[in-house]
Amino acid sequence: IATDNNGAKSLSVNDSNHGKAKHIDIRYHFIRSHIESKSFLVTHTPGIINTADIFTKPLARVVFQAHVARLGL
């Protein structure tokens, strides 16, 4: 799993945050169990190269165009 959010990465990997995140739904626990079993790996991907950003937030024109090119659109 690639993310540009260090907080999300820390929450998924670090058990010490569990008490502060009890409000997070069951999908979190699904991901945690896969990370613990080593079937998922969470890596930091800078937003500038995280093509999924095109679907989640407004981007500068140059970054948007680079993502569009990576997607072949």
Image (spheres, helix red, strand yellow):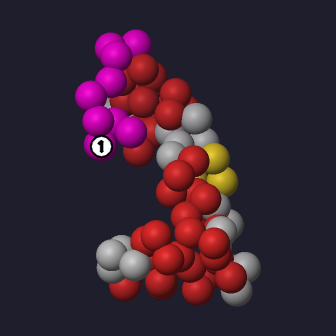
Is residue 65 among what the camera can see? no
Is residue 71 found left or right of 48 in the rendered image? left
Callout count: 1
Which residue is pictured at 47% across the width and 83% down the height? 29
Is residue 70 among what the camera can see? yes
Which residue is pictured at 50% across the width and 39% down the height? 50
**Viewer-nearest residue: 27 or 73:** 27
- Which residues fall within the magenta stretch? 53-62
| Image location of residue 25, percent across then percent down | 33, 79
Residue 1: quadrant of the picture: bottom right
Residue matched to label 1: 56
Which residue is pictured at 61% across the width and 59% down the height? 10
Q: Is residue 17 above or below residue 49?
A: below
Other residues around mark 1 within 10 Å, as few (<14) / some (14–19) / many (≥20): few
Is residue 22 found left or right of 50 in the rendered image? left
In the image as oriented, which residue stretches furthest toward the top? 62
**Viewer-nearest residue: 26 or 57:** 26
| Image location of residue 69, percent across then percent down | 43, 27
User: Residue 58 lies in magenta, yes or no?
Assistant: yes
| Image location of residue 30, percent across then percent down | 48, 84
In the image as oriented, which residue stretches furthest toward the front? 19
